[in-house]
Image: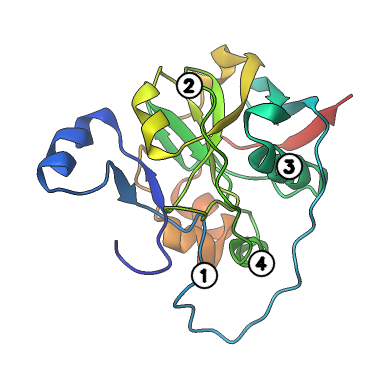
Amino acid sequence: MRSSFTAVRPLAPRQLTSSILCGALVLICGACSGGGGGRTTSEEYLPVPHERAPDHFKVRFETPKGNILIQVERDWAPIGADRFYTLVKTGYLNGDRFFRVVPKFVIQFGLAPDPKLTGRWRQSNLKDDPVKENNMRGTVVFATAGPNTRTTQLFINTNDNVRLDGQGFAPFGRVIDGMNVVDQIYSGYGEQPDQTRIQTEGNAYLEKEFPNLDYIKAATIVE
């Protein structure tokens, strides 16, 4: 890993063989989806909110390409479902860029437009949920940096990635309408955006360097 500020994300299929040969986890370092260890700043953040999610609920993402509707089943991964519910309710996901798009693998998001907001949530790791559902196309999952390190980074599986099941990636919901929109999310930058810079500079960095990224205009609970 590059530093204590990095997080682990699922490896794209093309990266699997070399990682296994190196004896590494089938995960690679990205930006912080959890863990504040080694943080050098003395800045302190208020505790993040927490709400218990309903047993079943829907979330609508409005994007420039159209709407995406997600069905969440709390019993799949209750801790993750509660965090997702809270992120949506508090507006955290509004303006989030889809900053990592690997075709036929995943679309990743969950770093706030305001780096101070990202920093606040980064201090609040979640305990792991057992993996009850497969990482199938359309499922929505939290990224992780290892055991008990989930915070805000999420991804949508755009392929059947069942190999992620054994790595602790626990789906908590799935796209029930708008996978055609998910498939149209801009992928031209691939994995170029620097996740550390997203954390420290927010959307100011992304809008300048990667202006074509698609994003969540608004995320809302659908009653």
* Residue at 61% in and 21% down: 174
Closer mark to the observer between disc 2 and disc 1: 2
Among the two numbered marks 2 and 1 on one chain, the one whose residue lies closer to the N terminus: 1
Which amino acid lies under the numbered mark 2 shown in the image of this protein? Asn
* Residue at 39% in and 55% down: 194
Per the image, the residue denoted by label 3 is 82
**Real-space CA distance between mark 2 and mark 3, rounded to the nearest whole angstrom:** 19 Å
Badge number at residue 134:
2
Residue 115, x across and y down, in percent: 61, 64
Question: Callout 1: few (<14), some (14-19), or many (20+) C-alpha neighbours within 10 Å?
Answer: some
The C terminus - image quarter: top right
Which amino acid lies under the numbered mark 3 shown in the image of this protein? Asp
- Locate residue 192 relative to residue 139 in the image: left or right: left
Residue 32, x across and y down, in percent: 47, 58
Closer mark to the observer between disc 4 and disc 2: 2
**Real-space CA distance between mark 2 and mark 1, rounded to the nearest whole angstrom:** 29 Å
Which amino acid lies under the numbered mark 1 shown in the image of this protein? Gly
Per the image, the residue denoted by label 1 is 36
Q: How many marks?
A: 4
